[in-house]
Amino acid sequence: MPRRGGPIQKRPIAHVDKVVAVASGKGGVGKSTVALNLAFSLALRKNEHTGVPLRVGLLDLDIFGPSIPTLMGLQNAGEPALTDAGAILPLTNHGLPCMSMGFLLPSSQPSSPEDPSAPGDNTDTPIVWRGLMVQKAVQQLLFDVDWSLGGASSGLDVLVVDMPPGTGDVPLTLGQLVNVDGCVIVSTPQDVALSDVRKGIAMLRKVNVPITGLILNQAYYLCPGCSSSGTSTPRYLFGKPDAFTRTASRLSLPVLAELPLVEGVSSSADAGRPYVLSGGGDVAKEDGEGGMRWREEMGRVAEGVVGALWGR
Ligand SMILES: Nc1ncnc2c1ncn2[C@@H]1O[C@H](COP(=O)(O)OP(=O)(O)OP(=O)(O)O)[C@@H](O)[C@H]1O
Ligand SMILES: [Mg+2]
């Protein structure tokens, strides 16, 4: 939060060892899908020292368009419980705890959070209160959630944060308030997406968020069952990856993965089932080589993130 008299102090998130954000300057490029599947890919890995599976949480910072409740199959989960100290307890599905503004909003929103009985025409200063409300909501999601997971557990090894599109209040607030350990940037091949990505990266670098690498999403399409030999030719539906590769090298950032466009990735997201949890046999049957490639590439992303976070 901007304040007078001295630099802003970044704070750790209680019970969280590492924070990794998934961002892009552009909307609709697959951030939430990547964040969800990255969280589960990480949770399928073991801590090198203890041999215990990594403890992973997922935080949705998309205040105006939260997708994580749906992607986690938790859209009808109701409100989260509170601890005695008033902290918000994450909701869990598929064994992974998560938190989202989508769990905190009443189902039909009043026109003003301060005065639920106010008529819906107080639009004089929407941007001002929106800005402040956004910062407040982000702060609450960052610092008022209890990630200790109870019992003997010592909290999370890593919290994956799904960012909203754009370079607005949310990434700025995150970068100013929290020590972010890594950030995965998602883009699609189109020039318009790449231009927004460059702006997003410039802004994240300004607030000292280290960029782990780039993902090219929807890079190509492999038509399942279109080839008798079993190997189909990649179709670059949104353009060849050359401009993306050039952007990555100009920014001196590694390319973590090139994810194909896969029908099952989209349908499983809508059904609240993370695609990385689908069995290999089902993926091969339904989505063919494209599905298998997508899984391998997502595994590479998780490897890259683990390497960047823990220096392996
Ligand atoms: N590789 C992929 N193959 C198929 N569908 C995909 C792929 N990546 C994303 N999608 C689909 O594209 C749509 C947008 O993805 P998603 O919601 O993850 O984007 P986003 O960047 O988080 O969007 P927003 O900016 O609105 O938060 C979703 O329907 C998702 O299922
Ligand atoms: Mg999203």
Image (cartoon, rainbow, N blue to C red):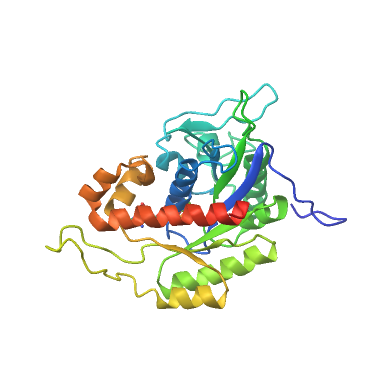
Residue at image position (29%, 49%) is 264
- The spot of residue 163 in percent (x, y) is 54, 53
Is residue 263 at least partly visible in the picture? Answer: yes
- Residue at 46%, 51% (x, y): give it: 32
Give the quadrant of the C terminus: bottom right
Q: Residue furthest left?
A: 228
Q: Quadrant of residue 104?
A: top right
Q: Is residue 164 visible?
A: no
Q: From the viewer's perspective, tell me whether residue 155 is left or right of residue 286.
A: right
Q: Count every numbered label the image shows and give the total.
A: 0
**Residue 254 % position (x, y):** 52, 67
For the point 48% across and 72% down, the residue is: 194
Q: Residue furthest right?
A: 5
Q: Where is residue 297 shown, x and y percent of the image?
A: 40, 57
Vertical relation: 168 (above or below) 32? below
Q: Which of 73 and 166 lies nearest the eye of the viewer?
A: 73
Q: Nearer the viewer, residue 20 or 192?
A: 20
When asked about the image quadrant of residue 189, the answer is bottom left
Give the percent coordinates (x, y) of residue 64.
52, 49
Q: Residue at x 60, y 62 (%)?
A: 211
